[in-house]
Amino acid sequence: MATSLAQVPSNTQEADQLHSNTTATSPEQNIKGYQVVQRETDGKWSDSNGMSLVGWHKDTSINTEQSLMRAMSLFTFNSTFKSNVRFCDIFSMTSDGAAFQYCCDEFIEEYKDQTFDQMAGTDARGFILGAVLAHQYGAGFVPIRKLGKLPGEVIRLDSTSEYAKNKLELNPSHVKKDGKILFTDDLLATGGTAQSSIKLIRQAGGQVEQAAFLISIPKLGGEKKMTDMGVKVYTLFEMEDNQSVINEWFNI
């Protein structure tokens, strides 16, 4: 059951205004933006698409929290793309400089006390966050690509996602042997893509114990796949936990 509605600021200036006029427990200012609901059961902020902010580092400011909720509101959904399966498009968020920066900063905050030799991401949206973190930490970046897009000798695995079946490839010469590697991607749903990608990295000699995702849908089983592989997951946003809604979204 919802306890309150909050208007998410539509830009950084409005976020600053909200920061000066409200508190984290009751953001109820009438600021032009996008509505979210705070659930009584777990206190999570959820928007009309069923997305919640779960990975916010609460030692940062209320301005950050509100800005992340604004970023959350920018994701768009398309039910006619990817074979009529409801598709989450992250690019309305990444094309907004302030929203993208706030999201990236949370991943930087999550891993600030750790060191990695390399980041790895899967073609193509996994490249975005992976490249940002590689630059931040002075690490290398390893691409995992779809069939036929990598030069040189490659290793290959089949991958099944909620959208389609693909073959993923990795050039093992790109992977530092016994290197500590953080795997990144935009969405963790059924976990098939992440699972195959991490298997390829490990086959090439890399060590993957952590994975970072912009969005997770735990009910589709991806987080369990990661746990079963010994991989700890960090995610910034989480999708609807109502199984009937998920079934409708993904035609399952």
Image (cartoon, rainbow, N blue to C red):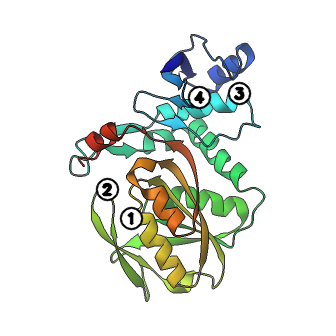
Front residue of 34 and 216 = 216
Closer to the chain start, of discs 4 and 2, is 4
Is 33 drawn above or below residue 50 in the view shown? above
Disc 1 residue crowd, few under 14, some 14–19, many 20+, Cα 10 Å: some
Is 159 drawn above or below residue 157 in the view shown? above
Tags 1 and 3 touching, CB below 8 Å: no
Residue pointed to by mark 3: 62
Q: How far apart are the two marked residues, 1 and 4, measured between alpha carbons? A: 30 Å
The kind of residue on which mark 2 rests is Glu
Residue pointed to by mark 4: 43
Closer to the chain start, of discs 1 and 2, is 2
Q: Residue at x 64, y 51 (%)?
A: 107
Q: How far apart are the two marked residues, 3 and 2, measured between alpha carbons? A: 35 Å
Determine the image quadrant of residue 123: bottom left
Tags 3 and 2 touching, CB below 8 Å: no
| Residue 21 image position (x, y, % from top left) | 71, 13
Mark 2 residue element: loop
The kind of residue on which mark 3 rests is Ile
The kind of residue on which mark 4 rests is Gly
The image's mark for residue 162 is 2
Disc 3 residue crowd, few under 14, some 14–19, many 20+, Cα 10 Å: many
Residue pointed to by mark 1: 192
Front position among marks 1 and 3 = 1
The kind of residue on which mark 1 rests is Gly
Q: How far apart are the two marked residues, 1 and 2, measured between alpha carbons? A: 8 Å
Q: How far apart are the two marked residues, 4 and 3, measured between alpha carbons? A: 15 Å
Tags 1 and 2 touching, CB below 8 Å: yes
Closer to the chain start, of discs 4 and 3, is 4
Mark 1 residue element: helix
| Residue 166 image position (x, y, % from top left) | 30, 69
